[in-house]
Structures are given as structure tokens and as C-alpha cells.
């Protein structure tokens, strides 16, 4: 098909800087496009990379050329959505295959390339890739057939192959990059190597995997490498994915994911500028999930329903009579439109974005790239589809009863108005729903009796909340997730003061409300006023967390620590909502996390030694970094840690099942990570991030002191040394901690080229700004003049002057100010922004502006008289940080 190229060219040059640069960079592709023959232009783009370029550069050039041709064919109407996504997906297969072959050839040039397979998941797996998609592979290997050196463990060989393949795909240069590679869909990604033995993976998916992982494999296939191995794996786990009997837990998992997405991306739910086309209510995810829920229900018995492709799945479901043909047609129409506009968003600057622009100018630009007049016209095009998809998806959740206004209900409505409810009908519908026993926790007579005794006081407390409707909605959500409500309601009836606090939490703190929905007994811990005292020192707190009853075992320890940590964290959050200082609460969060690590690591070491003995002269040591190293966390903070071990790596443990030191401590480290992060019957604990270890996520989980010191001397990047400014040993003997502290001191104080360090740091900050933009002006961590700028400023000056290497950021800043190296107003700026960050994680976890009713609470927590005064102080703080950062960065901006 020959198309009119001139109109498409005008739209590209007028509205897409990325595609314009590609046209200028590859004139041979531009010339082919000018003929109007898109298939011929694609052939030119596919020939851009030459063998002499090397695999990585060849792929980068082809990737940009193919993206250009595909976008041109899309914009001109020559290709439909299916051809567009298939072309991009086919290139992804080619790129992964070539990168894998190159990685294996580099290490094993004479060996047969087998025993390693790349499984494609997500949109790559269903051949529906976007212009700017990540790829989400799972890497598997067969130890029996994978090439490896004579003294090389197949596991190490597989990790090296996978790491090199990823490097070839993700590395950037003047030609751009090939793909971002996200390997976190593998089992327990925080603790497992990037490549897994195939039989171990099969065992995991047959016995341990979660419901969302079942859904993820709807869109999976072998994409590169040993295809026979990939097909074997997928055949083995097929019964896990496609179960002949209904698996409502998996279906609930998908619906719950959608609900959480709606909650988490609340700022992108309101249709209009800023709407999230992917995750917003009525967006792409809800089309995909609607199809997948029906596939999981019926696909175990009907193989024709198992397509990973969303459009094909909808058609198959309609043909089988499982969804109405008009519903399938409307979903397909909406999906094509949403994906098309999503592609327009990504064409502008090759960014992985799914949100409609917030500014009118950017909105008009995307609209005109698509070929409509302006942003309003684009919204008018999308609005009916978004609203219909959202309403259709709501059918997967139980419908609420409508409240009819009987005489009694009219009286109740009047009472609710007197209490302060501006929308009594909604409140009445909630009450009717509870009284009808439509919620699991209220199905028994005693539970409804407990509710009735509490209801008058509870509704009065909610009515006095700054946002009664928001508080009532969160209470309804919480009750809906309780297994039983009797004890919860009886406790509140006996403690009226707790009802008022509950109303505050439900009004202002979705993070705490979600925690209550998972564990209603958290409210019990607030009965005693001592719950609001600061946590004790780490040593005392660790003993309290680890205390067990006689006869309780290691599993009981995991549960007890989760319960007690949950109680402490919830109390600290409630303390902030009641008016406590967020900085003091942040230090409390830090002590609780450190005590949890001490308690669980010690218990895990003892459990591990019972099976494998001890390594003579060796012990595991945990190094904290980031906020954990600095001792001030938020409610949502991950734990950044590095695992190290002392002694000779060639030693062997002395237990009944001996292990070599490296294997011993790596397995022990993984056990500790699992102890801190896996869900038990008592719920989750912390997310653990070990990517700051030597060689990052692709290196060993635990390394020896000697290896760590050598890596820091010879191989570490500048950003790794910057990260060590906040490093602090938190687990291990006093002797080991002292030895590790000496390594840190040697690393931080060694001679270095400060000019090069500053240049690298400025570049790193620029990369962060490009790839992780702030969610809003109140994303105090990522905004220009925010916390990340201040952290870089402090760390660079620590190295510049060889001083103030204190992991506590506030203390380090104070020392630099006292020495005259930084302006004094940064101390106040740091305190204000840190306080805001801590309180915002409770009240606005998406880093957007908090609800209007919550703003006075936030202002008070940050020491301001009112919200406007807080914004003035915040603007002043950002200006101070931005000026100091600009002065430091200015000499290097031109280099960037």
C-alpha cells in the first residue's frame, strides 16, 4: 500500500522531536518513507546495522529505524494496531536472540548454543509491544546442556550469559538503546539469581507461585535461545496456568490488582489532562484484565480461549458465548483507540509514558500528532470509551444495593444531614449494605448486632472528619476485607476515643487505612497511651520483637516479628496523624527496621547453623545504606542492604550438611532476605533492595570483605561510592563491624579526581531527572530543588572536602555548614522537606498534592501555620537547594 507521505511528515516534524531526529539521522530511511511504500521502508530500516558495527550498535540503529518506520506507517494509516505491535514485537525477538547468541559466543565460541532460553512475558509475550515498552523476560537454563567452563558452575555461567545479554540490550550511546530489560518477574527477584534452573522454576510455579503469577503466564512464550527448553517448561507449568477447575483466588488476585491500581494511581483516575491511559479507571489494564478474568475461569477447559493477545482473546470469548458480542466489540474498539493514543504519547520523545499531558500545550501537541484539532477534541474522542470500559469492568465486582427511601430511611437521612454528611444517600447505601449482611464480616447476627451498637457513635465521628465521604468509603473498604468484625466493633464501642482516632486515620491516611483493613487488631495497640511513646533503643527493641513463648519455632518468630513491627509502624503513623513530629517518627521507623533485621537475622543464622554448621572464622555482616543507613525512614521505605561475610571464602562449614563459604553465606543471605520480605500468615514486613551490592542485581548476593574492599578500590562506579556515604554496619559482631567500618573509611577517604566525580554526579542527577521525573511539584524527593538534589550536593561536598562522612544526612549537612562549605539555610530546607516526605507517605503516597481536607494536618506536621504558609516555605527551601546545586553543576552542564 502506497500512502501520502507529505501530510504524515508534516505531523512528525511539527509534533515529534524523537521521530524528527530519527529522520535526520537516517536519511536513507526517510527517502524510503517518501516513496509511500512502508514495507520497502521497513526493509531499509532492518538493514541499518552492519556486521562491522557489532551486535549492540547494530541493534540500536535498527531499533530506531524500525521505530521510525512503524510510527510513520501508524500515523499515516498504512498499518493497523496489530501490524504495528507485531512489527515491534518481532524486532524484540530478533534483538534478544542476537544479544543472547553474542553473549554465548563471547564466552563459549566453540560450544553449541543450547540450554538457555528467554521467555517473553507481558506485552512482549503477547506480541503487543509499545513503542517504548520494557521487555519482561524470565531466563531459564538447563544445567545439563548449558555450555560452561571446566571449573565453572553452570549457575554462574547462566548468570554471566544473562547479564551480558541484558547489557547488550540496555546500554545507551549516541544511537540510543535497544530495550530496557526488567527481570523482576522471576520468582523472588530480590534474592534469586537472574537466571534460574528450569526444574527449580517448574517446582516453584507448581507449588509456591501466587495468583498474579498465574495470570502473568497467560501472555508467555519462548522468544529466544533454546526453544525446545522453553516449550518444555511451558508445557510443564500449563496445568498451573490453565486449571480445569475454577480458581477464584487467581481471579480475585486480578480484580484486587485492578482495585489497588485504581487506588494507587488515584491522581490518574479522574478523566482529563493527566489521566493514566494504562492504569486509570476504564483504561487499557481494565480491558486486559476483563479478558484475563474470563480466560482464567474458562480457559482450563477450552484451549481456544488461551490467546495471550488481548484482541484475539476478546474475539474468542465472544465466539464461545462467554461475553456478549457487543461487549467484545466495544472493548476491542476502546482497546485499539487507547493503545493508539498511548503510542502517540510515546512517539513524542520515546518515553515510557501512559499519561495524557497535564499542560494544555503538550496536550494539543499530542492531539495534533494524532491528527485531531486540539486537546479538547482528543478528550472528546476518549471520554465515552473510558467511561464505558470503567462501567463494564465494575461488573466484575459485587454490585452495591440501592437504598430506597422508606419512612425510617428518611429519618436516618435527616439524622445524617444533622451530623454533617453532605451526601446522606451514599452513607445510607453503605449502612444498608452492611445491615443486609452483604459483607463477609457482617454475615452473622452477632456481628451485625455489634455494628448496630457502635453505629451512632461511629457515624457521628465520621461526620466530624474533614472529609466524611472519604472516611466512610475507606471504612467500607476496610470492613469488606475483614474476616470477622465482632471484636473490632466491640472494641470501638468500649473505647470511644479510638473511634475519633479511627475517623482521623480513615480521613487522612490511606496507607494506615489499608494496614487496618489487613489487620484490624492494629487498633488494639493504640488503647494504651504508651503506644505513642518513641520506640526504645535498637538493642531493647530487638529483644522485644524476638521474644517467643516456650515451644515456639522459627516460623513463629517470622509471624511474631511481623505482628510486632506492624504494631510499631502503625503506632508511629498514628502518632504523625495526631500531631507528632515526623522527623522523630522517621527515626522511630528506622529503629524498628533495624531491630527487625537484628531479630530476624539472628534467628535465621541460628536456624541455618542447625543444618549446616558454622564456617570457621566467618560470619555474615549486614551493611545498611540509603535511608536505613541514615537511620530515618518513612512508612513506605524499602531496606537497602549489602550482605558481606568475613573469613576465607575457600573455607567450608562444619555441620552435617557442609557448604563452601561462598555458597553458605549466599544461601544464608537469601534466607535473611526471605525472612524480611516474604508474606506469612501475619502479612508482609519490608521490601528488601540488594541492588547496591557489588556488580548490582547481577552479582552475588553476599561477598567477602576482601572482595568488597577490592571491588571498591578497583571496579566500583562513582555512584557506588556516593551511596557508601550513607553506609552503616547494622548486623554482625563488634569486631566485624569495626573491620567493615575501616573498609568504608578507606574507600571514602581515598585520593580521587574530584572534578571527575562531580562530573559523573551531575550526569547521574541528569539521568535521574530524565528517566524518573517527579509525579508532581510536591514530589519532594524528585523535583528540581528537592531531596535528591540536596543529597547529591551533600555527598559531592563530603568528597570535595574529605569530611562529614556521617550516614545521617542531617548531621553531615550540619558539619558541612559549620565548616563553611554549604549555606546555612540548607539545614532548615532539609528538615522541612524530610518532614514533608515522611508525612506524605501516609497521606498522599502517590506524591501528588494531598486532599484539601488533609492539607492543614500536613502543614501542622511540617511546622507551618497553614497550607499556604507551608507552600511558601517549601518554595523557599527548593530555591535554596536549587541555587546551591546549580552553582555546583554549572561547569558540567555543557558536557552533559
Image (tube, grey):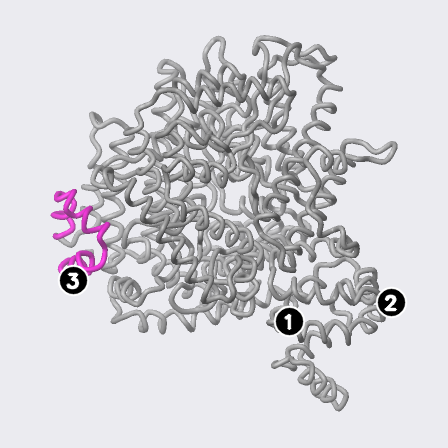
Q: Which residue is mark 3?
A: 7
Position of 203 compared to 17: left or right? right
- Foreground residue among 696 and 59: 696
Q: Nearer the viewer, residue 165 or 830?
A: 830
Mark 1 and mark 2 in contact? Answer it, CB < 8 Å.
Answer: no
Q: Position of residue 238 (x, y in %)?
A: 59, 40
* Magenta-drawn segment: 5-34
Secondary structure beneath dot 3 equals: helix
Front label number (3 vs 1): 1
> Would you place residue 807 above or below residue 846 in this image?
above
Residue 14 picture quarter: bottom left
The Cα–Cα distance between marks 3 and 2, rounded to whole angstroms, is 71 Å
For disc 1, the marked residue is 465
Q: Is residue 397 visible?
A: yes
**Label 2 secondary element:** helix
Q: Residue at x 40, y 45 (%)?
A: 824
Marked residue nearer the N-terminal end (3 or 2): 3
Q: Residues within 10 Å of mark 3 (few under 14, many from 20)?
A: few
Task: Note whether 15 is above or below 690 in the view shown.
Answer: below
Distance of label 1 from label 2 (alpha carbons): 28 Å
Q: Residue at 18% across / 41% down in the picture? A: 44
Q: Which residue is mark 2?
A: 446
Amino acid at each position: 500500500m502506497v500512502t501520502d507521505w507529505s501530510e504524515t511528515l508534516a505531523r512528525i516534524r511539527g509534533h515529534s522531536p524523537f521521530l524528527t531526529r530519527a529522520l535526520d539521522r537516517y536519511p536513507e530511511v526517510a527517502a524510503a518513507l517518501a516513496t509511500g511504500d512502508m514495507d520497502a521502508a521497513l526493509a531499509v530500516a532492518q538493514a541499518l546495522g552492519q556486521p562491522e558495527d557489532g551486535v549492540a550498535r547494530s541493534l540500536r540503529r535498527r531499533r530506531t529505524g524500525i521505530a521510525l518506520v512503524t510510527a510513520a506507517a501508524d500515523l499515516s494509516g498504512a498499518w493497523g494496531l496489530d501490524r504495528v505491535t507485531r512489527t515491534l514485537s518481532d524486532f524484540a525477538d530478533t534483538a534478544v536472540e542476537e544479544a543472547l547468541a553474542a553473549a554465548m559466543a563471547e564466552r563459549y565460541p566453540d560450544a553449541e548454543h543450547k540450554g538457555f532460553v528467554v521467555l517473553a512475558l507481558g506485552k512482549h509475550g503477547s506480541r503487543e509491544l509499545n513503542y517504548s515498552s520494557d521487555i519482561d523476560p524470565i531466563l531459564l537454563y538447563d544445567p545439563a546442556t548449558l555450555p560452561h567452563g571446566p571449573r565453572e558452575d553452570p549457575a554462574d555461567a547462566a548468570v554471566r550469559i544473562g547479564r551480558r545479554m541484558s547489557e547488550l540490550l540496555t546500554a545507551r550511546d549516541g544511537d540510543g538503546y535497544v530495550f530496557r530489560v526488567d527481570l523482576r518477574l522471576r520468582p523472588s527477584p530480590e534474592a534469586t539469581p537472574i537466571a534460574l534452573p528450569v526444574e527449580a522454576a517448574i517446582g516453584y510455579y507448581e507449588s509456591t507461585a501466587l495468583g498474579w503469577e498465574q495470570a502473568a503466564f497467560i501472555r508467555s512464550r519462548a522468544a529466544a535461545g533454546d526453544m525446545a527448553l522453553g516449550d518444555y517448561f511451558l508445557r510443564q507449568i500449563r496445568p498451573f496456568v490453565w486449571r480445569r477447575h475454577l480458581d477464584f483466588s487467581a481471579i480475585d488476585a486480578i480484580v484486587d490488582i485492578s482495585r489497588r491500581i485504581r487506588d494507587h494511581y488515584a491522581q490518574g483516575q479522574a478523566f482529563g489532562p493527566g489521566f493514566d491511559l494504562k492504569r486509570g479507571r476504564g483504561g487499557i489494564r481494565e480491558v486486559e484484565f476483563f479478558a484475563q478474568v474470563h480466560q482464567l475461569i474458562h480457559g482450563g477447559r477450552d484451549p481456544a480461549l488461551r490467546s495471550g493477545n488481548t484482541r484475539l482473546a476478546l474475539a474468542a470469548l465472544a465466539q464461545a458465548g462467554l461475553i456478549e458480542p457487543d461487549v467484545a466489540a466495544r472493548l476491542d474498539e476502546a482497546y485499539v483507540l487507547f493503545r493508539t493514543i498511548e503510542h502517540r504519547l510515546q512517539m513524542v520523545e520515546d518515553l515510557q509514558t501512559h499519561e495524557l499531558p497535564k499542560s494544555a500545550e503538550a496536550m494539543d501537541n499530542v492531539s495534533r500528532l494524532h491528527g485531531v484539532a486540539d486537546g479538547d477534541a482528543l478528550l472528546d474522542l476518549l471520554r465515552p470509551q473510558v467511561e464505558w470500559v470503567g462501567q463494564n469492568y465494575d461488573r466484575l465486582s459485587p454490585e452495591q444495593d440501592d437504598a430506597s427511601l422508606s419512612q425510617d430511611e428518611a429519618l436516618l437521612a435527616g439524622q445524617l444531614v444533622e451530623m454533617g454528611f453532605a451526601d446522606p444517600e451514599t452513607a445510607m447505601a453503605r449502612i444498608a449494605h452492611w445491615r443486609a449482611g452483604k459483607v463477609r464480616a457482617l454475615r452473622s447476627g452477632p456481628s451485625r448486632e455489634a455494628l448496630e451498637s457502635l453505629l451512632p457513635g461511629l457515624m457521628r465521628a465520621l461526620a466530624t472528619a474533614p472529609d466524611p465521604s472519604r472516611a466512610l468509603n475507606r471504612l467500607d473498604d476496610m470492613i469488606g476485607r475483614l474476616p470477622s468484625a465482632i471484636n473490632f466493633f466491640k472494641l470501638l464501642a468500649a473505647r470511644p476515643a479510638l473511634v475519633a482516632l479511627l475517623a482521623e486515620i480513615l480521613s487522612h491516611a490511606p496507607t494506615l487505612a489499608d494496614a487496618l483493613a489487613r489487620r484490624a487488631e492494629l487498633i488494639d495497640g493504640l488503647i494504651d497511651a504508651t503506644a505513642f511513646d518513641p520506640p526504645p533503643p535498637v538493642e531493647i527493641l530487638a529483644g522485644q520483637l524476638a521474644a517467643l513463648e516456650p515451644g515456639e519455632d522459627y516460623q513463629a518468630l517470622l509471624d511474631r516479628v511481623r505482628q510486632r513491627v506492624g504494631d510499631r509502624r502503625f503506632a508511629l503513623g498514628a502518632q504523625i496523624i495526631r500531631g507528632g513530629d515526623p522527623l522523630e517518627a522517621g527515626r522511630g521507623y528506622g529503629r524498628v527496621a533495624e531491630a527487625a533485621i537484628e531479630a530476624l537475622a539472628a534467628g535465621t543464622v541460628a536456624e541455618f547453623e542447625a543444618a549446616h554448621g558454622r564456617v570457621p572464622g566467618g560470619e555474615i555482616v549486614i551493611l545498611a545504606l540509603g535511608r536505613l543507613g541514615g537511620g530515618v525512614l518513612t512508612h513506605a521505605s524499602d531496606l537497602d542492604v549489602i550482605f558481606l561475610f568475613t573469613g576465607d571464602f575457600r573455607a567450608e562449614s562444619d555441620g552435617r550438611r557442609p557448604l563452601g563459604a561462598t555458597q553458605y553465606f549466599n544461601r544464608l543471605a537469601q534466607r535473611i532476605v526471605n525472612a524480611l520480605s516474604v508474606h506469612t500468615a501475619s502479612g508482609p514486613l519490608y521490601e528488601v533492595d540488594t541492588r547496591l551490592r557489588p556488580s548490582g542485581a547481577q552479582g552475588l548476593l553476599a561477598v567477602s570483605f576482601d572482595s568488597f574492599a577490592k571491588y571498591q578500590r578497583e571496579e566500583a562506579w562513582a555512584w557506588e561510592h556516593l551511596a557508601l556515604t550513607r553506609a552503616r554496619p547494622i548486623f554482625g559482631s563488634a569486631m566485624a563491624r569495626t573491620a567493615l567500618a575501616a573498609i568504608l573509611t578507606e574507600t571514602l577517604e581515598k585520593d580521587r579526581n574530584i572534578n571527575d566525580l562531580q562530573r559523573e554526579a551531575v550526569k547521574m542527577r541528569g539521568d535521574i531527572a530524565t528517566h524518573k521525573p517527579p509525579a508532581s511539584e510536591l514530589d519532594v524527593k524528585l523535583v528540581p530543588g528537592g531531596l535528591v538534589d540536596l543529597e547529591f550536593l551533600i555527598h559531592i561536598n563530603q568528597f570535595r572536602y574529605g569530611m562529614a562522612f556521617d550516614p545521617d544526612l542531617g548531621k553531615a549537612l550540619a558539619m558541612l555548614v559549620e565548616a563553611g562549605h554549604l549555606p546555612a539555610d540548607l539545614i532548615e530546607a532539609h528538615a522541612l522537606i524530610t518532614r514533608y516526605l515522611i508525612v506524605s507517605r501516609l497521606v498522599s503516597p502517590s506524591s501528588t498534592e494531598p486532599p484539601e481536607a488533609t492539607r492543614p494536618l500536613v502543614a501542622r506536621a511540617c511546622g507551618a501555620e497553614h497550607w499556604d504558609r507551608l507552600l511558601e516555605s517549601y518554595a523557599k527551601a527548593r530555591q535554596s537547594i536549587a541555587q546551591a546545586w546549580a552553582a555546583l553543576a554549572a561547569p558540567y552542564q555543557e558536557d552533559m
